[in-house]
C-alpha cells in the first residue's frame, strides 16, 4: 500500500478557503446600504462574490452604479470591513483539525491572499494563528498579485522551500492559475465562494475537494517525491 503524507509546505488562500469570511463582508456591505437608507442584502445574495474582493462586493450591492462609482466605494468598504473583521466569520469546519494534523506531521503552512496584507495580519491573532502561520503574503505585499505566480514563488522562497514540495489550496480560478504558473501542485477548494458560471472542472487543478474536512486525509493531497 502507498504511504500517503501531507506536503512539507501547504499554502492557502484565505477567504473562502481557510475562513468563511462572508458574514464579515456582508455586515460591511449592509452598513454601507443602511447609511444610504437602503434595505440589507441577504448572505446568500452576496456570498458568491466574496472571493472576488472589495470591488466585486461593492458592485453586487450597488448594481446601478458605474464601474468608476463602484471603485470609489472601495475605501469606504475597507474602512468598515476593518471594524467588522473577525466578528462574524469563522474557519470552515475541518480547517482547525487539519491544520493541527499538518503541524503534527512536521509540515508548515502559510497564507497567500489577495486581501490587503494589513487586514490579513489583523485577522491572525483573532484566529489564534499569529504564531502558527509561517508566511503571509497579501494582495499588496508585492508588485504582483494572483493570478501572477510571484506571490506563491515568494512564499516558497521565504520558507526556504522547493516549489515541488509545496501545495496551494484555493477556491477561485486565479488561485489555480497562480499555482500552475508557479509550477506548484494545487487543490481546488469547492467548499468556497463561486459564481454560478464558474467552472472549476476547467481550472486544471491537480485535485478538487468538496469539503474542507477532506483535507484531513493525507491521501486526498497531491503526493510528492519522498523526502
Image: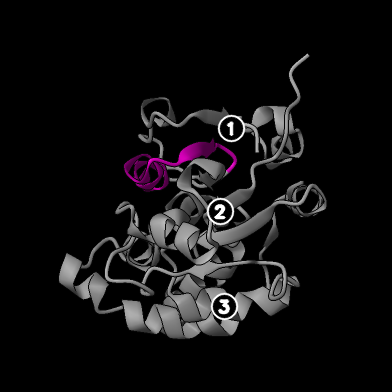
Q: Disc 3 marks which residue? A: 121
Q: In x, y percent, where is residue 92? A: 69, 51
Q: In x, y percent, where is residue 81? A: 51, 78
* Horizontal side of residue 157 vs 6, given as left or right: left
Q: Secondary structure at mark 2?
A: strand
* Horizontal side of residue 38 vs 210, given as left or right: left
Q: Earlier in the sequence, mark 3 or mark 2?
A: 2
Real-space CA distance between mark 3 and mark 1, rounded to the nearest whole angstrom: 30 Å
Identified at 56% across, 71% down, the residue is 27
Q: Residue furthest front?
A: 227
Foreground disc of the pair 2, 1: 1
10 Å crowding of disc 3: few (<14), some (14-19), many (20+)? some
Q: Secondary structure at mark 3?
A: helix
The residue lying toward the viewer, choosing from 220 and 51, is 220
Q: Earlier in the sequence, mark 2 or mark 1?
A: 2
Write the start and end of the magenta stretch as one range.
Answer: 173-191
Q: Earlier in the sequence, mark 3 or mark 1?
A: 3
Q: To which quarter of the image does residue 225 belong?
A: top right
Q: Secondary structure at mark 1?
A: loop
Q: Residue 169 colored magenta?
A: no
Q: Residue 174 colored magenta?
A: yes
Real-space CA distance between mark 2 and mark 1, rounded to the nearest whole angstrom: 17 Å
Identified at 44% across, 70% down, the residue is 138
Q: In x, y percent, where is residue 140? A: 36, 74
Q: Disc 2 marks which residue? A: 12
**Mark linked to residue 224:** 1
Identified at 16% across, 72% down, the residue is 68
Amino acid at each position: 500500500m502507498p504511504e500517503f503524507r501531507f506536503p512539507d509546505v501547504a499554502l492557502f488562500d484565505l477567504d473562502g478557503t481557510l475562513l468563511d469570511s462572508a458574514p464579515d463582508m456582508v455586515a460591511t456591505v449592509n452598513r454601507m446600504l443602511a447609511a444610504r437608507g437602503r434595505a440589507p442584502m441577504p448572505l446568500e445574495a452576496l456570498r458568491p462574490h466574496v472571493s472576488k474582493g472589495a470591488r466585486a462586493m461593492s458592485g453586487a450591492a450597488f448594481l446601478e452604479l458605474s464601474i468608476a462609482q463602484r471603485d470609489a466605494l472601495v475605501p469606504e468598504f475597507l474602512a468598515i470591513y476593518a471594524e467588522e473583521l473577525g466578528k462574524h466569520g469563522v474557519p470552515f469546519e475541518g480547517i482547525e483539525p487539519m491544520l493541527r494534523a499538518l503541524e503534527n506531521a512536521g509540515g508548515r503552512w502559510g497564507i497567500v491572499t489577495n486581501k490587503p496584507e494589513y487586514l490579513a495580519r489583523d485577522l491572525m491573532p483573532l484566529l489564534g494563528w499569529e504564531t502558527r502561520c509561517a508566511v503571509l503574503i497579501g494582495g499588496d505585499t508585492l508588485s504582483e498579485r494572483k493570478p501572477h505566480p510571484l506571490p506563491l514563488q515568494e512564499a516558497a522562497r521565504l520558507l526556504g522551500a522547493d516549489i515541488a514540495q509545496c501545495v496551494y489550496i484555493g477556491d477561485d480560478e486565479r488561485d489555480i492559475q497562480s499555482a500552475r504558473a508557479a509550477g506548484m501542485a494545487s487543490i481546488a477548494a469547492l467548499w468556497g465562494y463561486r459564481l454560478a458560471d464558474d467552472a472549476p472542472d476547467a481550472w486544471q487543478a491537480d485535485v478538487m475537494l468538496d469539503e474542507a474536512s477532506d483535507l484531513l486525509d493525507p491521501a486526498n493531497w497531491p503526493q510528492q517525491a519522498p523526502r
